[in-house]
Image (tube, rainbow, N blue to C red):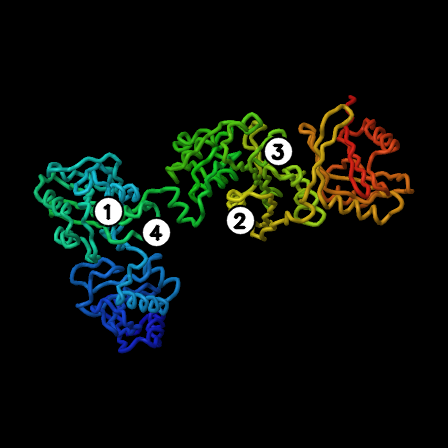
Amino acid sequence: MTYPDWLAQDIRAIAQVPYIENLTHSCIGSHVEVCFDFTYDEYAQVSDERLRNPEPIKLRYPLLQLPSKPEFLSNRDTFPENLPHLNPVPEGHPASICLWRKGGNSALYVQKGIVACLEVLKDWLEDASLGRLQYDGWEPSPRGGLISFNVDLGSWQKIAVNPKYCGKILSMSSRLFISKLRHGSQIGLVIPENKIKEKKDNSYFLKPFKYDEASQVRTYFLVPDCDFVEHEHCSIELNSFDDLLKYSDHEQLSKAIQFIRSCKKPKGKSAAVLAIAQRRPLPLIKEIPSLSNDVNARKVEIVSVLVVHDNNGFSFHELQVKSPVTSEMLASVSGTDVIDKDLSILGCGSIGSTISDFLVRAGHKRFSLWDDDLFEAHNNARHVLCQTTSEQAWAALGFKVIKMKERMMQINPEASVRCFIQKFDSKQIPKLQKNTHVIDTTGEAIEHSWLHGLTVPYTRVFIADMGNLAFLMTQIPGDIADMLDIEAVLLSLSSSEQRICEWLHSESHLSDKMLGLSCSSATMEMPWFKINGHISALMPTLLRQLNTPSTCVLMNTLDQNGNPLGLTTFDVENSEFKFEKVEVVDAQGLTWIITFNQAVMEAVHKIRNNHLPSEAAGYVLGLYNINTKRISIVVATQGQFSSSASSATLHSIEQDTEAQDILTNSNNMLKPLGTWHSHPGESAQASSRDLTTFEELLSNQERTLPTVMLICAKAEVKFLVGINRVI
C-alpha cells in the first residue's frame, strides 16, 4: 500500500534513529502500525525490572491524508499498566504512553515532530526504569471526554483533607446540561453547587434529566479515610462499575456503587455524578492552575464520572475535571502576571472597552469604569459589546459602564467592577482607591485641573490621524514631567518625526460621521480592525506600565490601509524628556509652575557661549494651562538679534526661521510663550531694562497667552512670568 507522504516521511525518519531496531510497518484497517524495538540508556540504579531494554513499542497512526499524531503504545502484553503517565485505555488494550504534560502527545508531535517525540520517549523509559516518572510531583491521568465537570479544585482538595469530611460520601445539587452530537458522542457541563451534606443511604441517588435541557442532578464527592493513600496509578478507562472498583480500593467508592445499584430508578433517563477523591503520595504538579496552596491538600486528585441509567441499563462517561474561570486561571492561560491594582478606566468607548476586555481576559480583577454614555446601535461598528436584533437591542440598552461590567463578569466571575455613570473630573479623585492606575481612553482634551491633583500613575491611550496613529503616554506621581510636558515634547517632535507632523496637520480635517439629527451624535470615521490592531500592539507596554509605571511615550503606526508599520518607543532618557521645575510669582502675587527640559537649557547655553562676551536672545515655545498656572517650555531658538555686552535687541518672531519651522510643523499647536536672553556674567537677576522690556510685552493688548522671559547667566537661570488681565 502507498502511504500518504507525511506518513512515509515519518517512517523514514524513525528508521534513521540509531536506537531503533527491527522496524516493521503494516496497514490494519483505518490505521497504520509502526513497530520496533526501542533501546534506551540503562543505569545500575534500575528499580523497576518490569521494564525491558530494548522495549517493544508500537506507533498506531490514523490513515489520513493530513498529518496526525500516532498513539504511543507498548507492543507487549506484560507491560506494567500501573506506571504513572499512562493514558486511560479499556481493560485488555495495550498500555498507552503519555509523553508530554504540556498539551499531551499531540502538542509534542505537532510542535516538534516524530523524532523529538522519540527523544522524549527515551527519557520516559529511562525514568520509568529508575522509578522517577513522578520525581517532580504526581500528574493526574488525562481523563475525560466532551463533558466538563467544573469545580473549584483548591476548595475541593481542602474538603478532602478536612477530618470533618474524611471517610464520608458528600452530596450536593448540581446543574447538568448535555447535548448529543451527530456522531453519537455527548457534550455538556456539570456544575456542582457549594452547599454540601452527608449521604448515608440509597434513597433518590439518581435524578431524572433530559438532553438539551438544564437539569438538577446530584454530585457525590467520595472522600477517603484520612490515612487512605493510593500509591499506584490505574490506567483503565472507567466504563463500568467493575472498572470503577478496579480503579480504587476506596471504601466510599464501593459503598456509593452499592447504593446506586440498589436504589430505586426513576423512569426514563436519570443520572448521578461520582467525584472520586484520591489521596496520592505526592502533590499534584504545580502547572495545574487553581490547585490548593496547601501541600497536603494538593496531594488530592479528583476523577469524575457521570453515571447514566435508562431502559438499556447503565452507561458511564468520564468527565473532564476543570476549574471554573478564575483570575489565576486566566492569568495562567494568558501568560501574564495579575496586577494587584485597581485599574480605573476613563471612557468605555471602542478603546476603553477593548482595553477592559484585554485586561479582564488576562486575569486582572479590580476595575473602576467611568463613562456617562449610552450603548447604542452604531457602537456595533467597533465596540466589544454587540447587539444584533431588535430584541437584543432592547436588552442591551443601557449605559456602557453597566454593559461592560456584565460582559467582564461573564469573562471572569471573580472580577470586581465598580461603575461610575459620569465623566471623571477633580471631584472624582477621592473615589480612586489607594492602589490605582488611571487609564484615560476618552481621547478628549485633558482637563489639567484634575490631572494636576492625581497622586497615582496616569496613562493616556488615544488614536489619531484618522486611525493611522495611536499613542500611549504615562505620567507618574513624583516625577517632574507631567502630561503637559509629555504632550509638549510630542508636539516638538513634529520637526523630526514626519508621521507626527502629518497627524498634526490632519487634525483640522478629521472625518466625523453624523449619526442622527442631534449635533451630539457624531463619531470619528475609523474601522474596528484599526482600533484592535493599535490596542493589541500597545498592550504589552500597557501591562508593563501597570506593573512598574514609569514615564513613557509610545507611538504605533499603521499605513493608510491599516497594515502595521511598527512601534516607535521614544527614549525618555533623552534630554527632551528630562525636566526641571521652578515656581515663579507674578506681579499679582500668583504662583506659576514652570517646567523646562534639558534640551532647552542645552540650546540656550550653547547659543550664549557662542556669542560671548555679547548677549544672545531667542524665543521659547511650549504649552500652558491657565487654570493650573502651568507652563512647559520645550523649545528655545536662536532668534535674529543685535547685541552688545549689556543688551540684546530681538527681532520679531516672524524673522526667526527656526521658530517658524517648529510652529509650522506642529500646526501651531506649540505656542510662542515668550523670549530668552543671556547675561554674560554670573548673575541672571533681571536688570531694570529687562523689567521694562517685560512690562512692554505684557501690555500688548493683542497677546492673550501668558508671557515668559527666561534669563540665562553662567551660574543660574531666572524667569519672569505674567499675563495681561486687562479686558
Find the distance from the CA under tag 4 to the CA under tag 2.
Answer: 31 Å
Looking at the picture, which amino acid does disc 1 mark?
A: Lys
SS at badge 1: strand
Asked if one can make out residue 660 in the rendered structure from this viewpoint, the answer is yes
Q: Secondary structure at mark 3?
A: loop
The numbered mark, 3 or 4, whose residue comes first in the sequence reads: 4
The span from disc 3 to disc 1 (Cα, nearest Å) is 56 Å
> Residue 330 in the image: x percent, y percent?
40, 45
Residue that numbered label 1 is attached to: 180
Q: Of the residues under marks 3 and 1, which one precedes in the sequence?
A: 1
Residue corresponding to mark 4: 286
* Residue 492, picture quadrant: top right
Position of residue 119 in the picture relative to residue 516 (left or right): left
> For mark 2, does the 10 Å Cα neighbourhood hold few (<14), some (14 to 19), or many (20 or more) residues?
some
Q: Determine which quarter of the picture holds residue 705.
A: top right
Amino acid type at circle 4 is: Lys
Name the residue beneath numbered marker 3: 446
**Is residue 669 among the parts visible in the rendering?**
no
Residue 243: x %, y % from top left: 15, 54
